[in-house]
Image (tube, coloured by chain):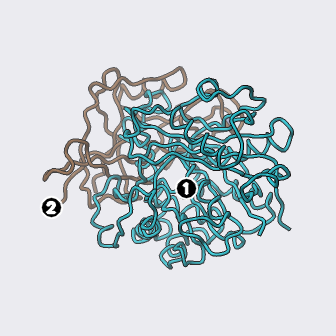
Amino acid sequence: MSATTGAAIVGIGRTPYYFRGTSAPQTIYELIGKAVFAALEDAGLSIEDVDGLAFFAAGFDCGTIMEQLGIPELTFSHIVSGYGGGMAAILDLATMGVTTGRAKTVVCIGASQQVGRRLGQVLGNLTATPEMIFHRIAGLAGPGQALALSARRHMHRYGTRREAFGEVVMASRAAAATRDTALRRKSLTLDEYMASPMLADPLCRLDFCLETDGALAFVVTSAERAADLPQEPVHIAAAAQVATRDWGRAFFWLNQPDDAFTTAGAGAVAERLYGLAGIRPKDIDVALIYDHFSPLVIMQLEDYGFCGRGEGGPFVESGAIRLDGALPINPHGGHLSEGYVVGMTHIHEAVEQLRGTAVNQVFGARTALVTGGPAPVPMSAAILRNER
Amino acid sequence: MSARSICPDFASLEVAWDAWSKPFWQAASERTLVMPRCGACGTFRWPVGPFCPECHAQSVEWLPPGQGSIYSFTILPVPGAYPTAAPSWRVPVLVEFADAPGVRLVSVLIDAPLDAIAIGDVVEPDWRPAANAKVPVFRLAVG
Ligand SMILES: [Zn+2]
């Protein structure tokens, strides 16, 4: 029996997506403001209606947002700790806010601006603490370089092929071809993929997601109140965040037990999420899988139960993740081809799919999965659903 | 002929340690690799911290971890060289040890033929000077 939380997404807004660093001279707060005002307009609400904020550790703060956007009062303001792994947990926070009476209207915010800094080199920017000095010695400057160790181990253990990584990228590019918002729209052949230079063997340049500036915002309120607002509500059927010790700091740690090392760290959150929603993987019509690095898409497909452990490579190579496949994923082109705003574009696409307004609409989509990224805990995910 | 991995220059690297990791670097100064094992229950932990996550004891004994082998690795183009005609390549390597179950050390594999590196290969530590310490790197074992 499927369940729901009693919270719904009633408004979405976003800025254009900019190649990293090119959103200047706008500040990150200007980007956030544009996304928030757009989401409120979409919801038929105003800034005075906002009494809650939810975001995750991403380089901006509540006070400055209130000051610059003119939010009079908040009774709920919470931040998910960690990195992109906690991205989908902003929907969990917003649900908590509106279903417990702490707030009526929670705005979820995600933004990224890489002027003078790069997320792709975030490890290299860190102080070489006693815990991180060996990453410095090794030369692991970014998550993709460290996750290349997982990808190679997955290939070694399960026979996963580069062709599978390539299929994830090609499927993403095929979806992006029709998207005005996408930064990489040109179609891609397997030969072109294979010719792409290695950046962190076995990951080539095309296995790395884009580095993008932009902001997105989502307005969450109770399902009851959503019924009176202009947009078709997209219900938060379930949202979950789970931190497990065997995943821990993930690519900052590299000491995950052997069985965890070749996963995306999402097995526990997947189990909890499906339990909360009362559904199984086969009930998902469209999946928005956090695709910062293509091999991690394959590992997440295993973690979320769309195929068996170690079978993610053959699963994607079968064509299953294409728009006309058994499990369409990332019809917006995802982080690999549309833009990378730390996962937020996936929530945006899930809402458009369930409203029936997506550019690459999955026909009859009723249930969507959104996953947070394989990154330090907490890991998070959400299941969204429409009323059709 | 296969290109070989570089040995990075660590001369300007300031190694940071704390009270818990200091014994590692003291042993390193004598070109000795040791890993920390709980003095109470015998579980290895890495990086070393104030408590054993299994039994919460604080005491640590530092032991030679035994034969190292490659758990995984990647190959990175060295910034500045790529994509010129003569790229050079750095090989981060994650090493597991025969006598230190459950922990892995990440460092760099030096002077290795790039097309011959494989998971499971046996490696040996070597030592390179940093600003305030000697840092462990690894080489493929001979024979
Ligand atoms: Zn112990």
- Mark 1 residue type: Tyr
In this figure, which residue is indicated by the disc labeled 1? A290
Q: Is residue A141 visible?
A: no
Q: Nearer the viewer, residue A10 or B116?
A: A10
Q: Nearer the viewer, residue B109 or A12?
A: A12
Tell me the cyan chain.
A
- Mark 2 residue type: Met
As displayed, is residue A181 above or below residue A191?
A: above
Q: Is residue B69 found left or right of B109 in the rendered image?
A: right
Contact between marks 2 and 1 (CB within 8 A): the answer is no
Residue B107 in which image quadrant: top left
Residue A96 place in picture, x, y as percent: 79, 42
Circle 2 sits in a helix, a strand or a loop, which is it?
Answer: loop
Quadrant of ligand 1 in image: top right
As displayed, is residue A365 above or below residue B11?
A: below
Residue A224 place in picture, x, y as percent: 86, 52
Residue A51 place in picture, x, y as percent: 75, 33
Q: Is residue B85 visible?
A: yes
Rendered image: mark on residue B1: 2
Does the residue tagged 2 have its C-beta within 8 Å of any atom of ligand 1? no
In the image, what residue occupies the spot 34% across and 20% down?
A: B132
Chain B rendered in what hue? brown
